[in-house]
Image (cartoon, rainbow, N blue to C red):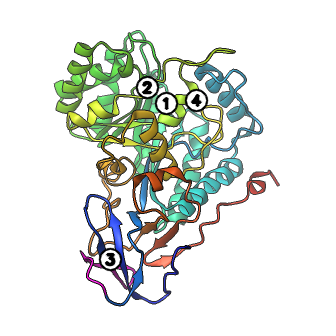
Amino acid sequence: MSLPSIPGTSRFVLRNVRTLGHEGLRDIEVAAGCVAGITLAAGGAGVDLAGRIVWPGMVDLHTHLDKGHIWRRAENPDGSFLGARTAVAADRAAHWTAADVSRRFEFALRCAHAHGTVAMRTHIDSLAPQDRISWPVFAEMRAKWAGRIALQGVALIPLEALDDAAYVRELVALLKANDGILGGLVMPMPGLAERLSALLRLAAENGFDLDLHMDETLAAEARSLPLLAQLALECGFEGRIVAGHCCSLSVQPDGELARTLDLVARARIGVVSLPMCNMFLQDRATARTPRMRGVTMIQELAARGIPVAAASDNTRDPFYAYGDHDLLEVYREAVRIAHLDRPFGDWANLVTSTPAELMGLPAGRIQVGAPADLVIFHAREPTELLARPHSDRIVLRAGRVIDTTPPDYAELDAP
Ligand SMILES: [Zn+2]
């Protein structure tokens, strides 16, 4: 049985759909591009979806659109984190012109759009002189894609960069011009507390939110996350904070984990797990099968009331050789890797409502009055949803069916 066709009219009803967070079937009325009503299934005229799952448009909280799709010219020879950083640095220096970043950035947006994503946050490698190349590309793409994918940008920098006052002035101006978020790569280092305090101060002074790569390592001594939470509490930081990765949380003793979860909850820090990238990089060594997987404590974070999302991270670059910005894939992998299936519960929020809340966007939910951005899957229950890639999904944007063909890889070839 194939998926039913959706009318091109401005008003129609999707009958007998299964939505997130509801037992039983619903009818969704679409009118003038918006959701006009959500009611218990009542029968009558309309498109009978026969119990199929309908999701809201998905939200990707953590990506690297400036970095993606460089694999053909920058492989990661040993597959390690260090190997990835080295390969990216060389590729950036040699190739990242505005035209190159723009081509790859837009290719990724087209993939995400085809899969049903409505909002994305991207980290942007922001050391000079790359900041002056990549942020204008971001600004152009944000304007061009407005209405299709809501974009947010994060300046990804090593914390040492904050020592250079002239650079910090340039960075602040770029972020202010682009509604940007302050980011950083946070790992154990000398003077970490002072540097995190400086980062919090810079964000507070300028009204920036923070989104940090935290402790992307299996070293148990990497405890930057509780330190950040403590410092944010001490200075009364009022912005939003998102902490990505948090891999070393997975190797903490129970008491230390409980203490960290408490601090993170009190500091209102949201966490985004990047399970596919972690599985690729963590505990990798040549000719040895990995034991430790480095995926953060998704279940424990959520049980403590901490908002937790899952996201794509890298795609076809030295940090992760695969990926296509398909959040159904991210959800599927997260469920399998972190055992989010006993019960399935509301874990689909990892890639819908929770990342939307952490981005401060009214997306990721099917709501009356909101645009009819819906993804219809040829599946009626979780294992049907998780067993297949669902390349035949129907994506509606503002009530209209869009073309879900992803772009051709040949389009990435330099002209
Ligand atoms: Zn990342």
Residue marked by disc 3: 28
Work out how far the residue at label 1 is from the one at label 2, CA to CA, in angstroms.
9 Å
Identify which amino acid the numbered label 3 is placed on. Answer: Ile
Residue marked by disc 2: 162
> Which of the two marks, 1 or 2, is nearer to us in this view?
1
- Residue name at image x 71 percent, y 33 percent: 91
Counting residues from the start of the chain, the first of labels 1 and 2 encountered is: 1
**Pointer 3 with pointer 4, Cβ within 8 A:** no
Counting residues from the start of the chain, the first of labels 1 and 3 encountered is: 3
Work out how far the residue at label 3 is from the one at label 4, CA to CA, in angstroms.
40 Å
Work out how far the residue at label 1 is from the one at label 3, CA to CA, in angstroms.
44 Å
Residue marked by disc 4: 280
Vertical relation: 186 (above or below) 96: above
**Pointer 1 with pointer 2, Cβ within 8 A:** yes
Label of residue 157 in the image: 1
Query: Quick check: is 170 in the magenta stretch?
Result: no
Q: Over which residues does the magenta segment extend?
A: 28-43
- Residue name at image x 53 percent, y 65 percent: 393
Work out how far the residue at label 1 is from the one at label 4, CA to CA, in angstroms.
22 Å
Vertical relation: 294 (above or below) 175: above
Look at the magenta stretch and give its main secondary structure: strand
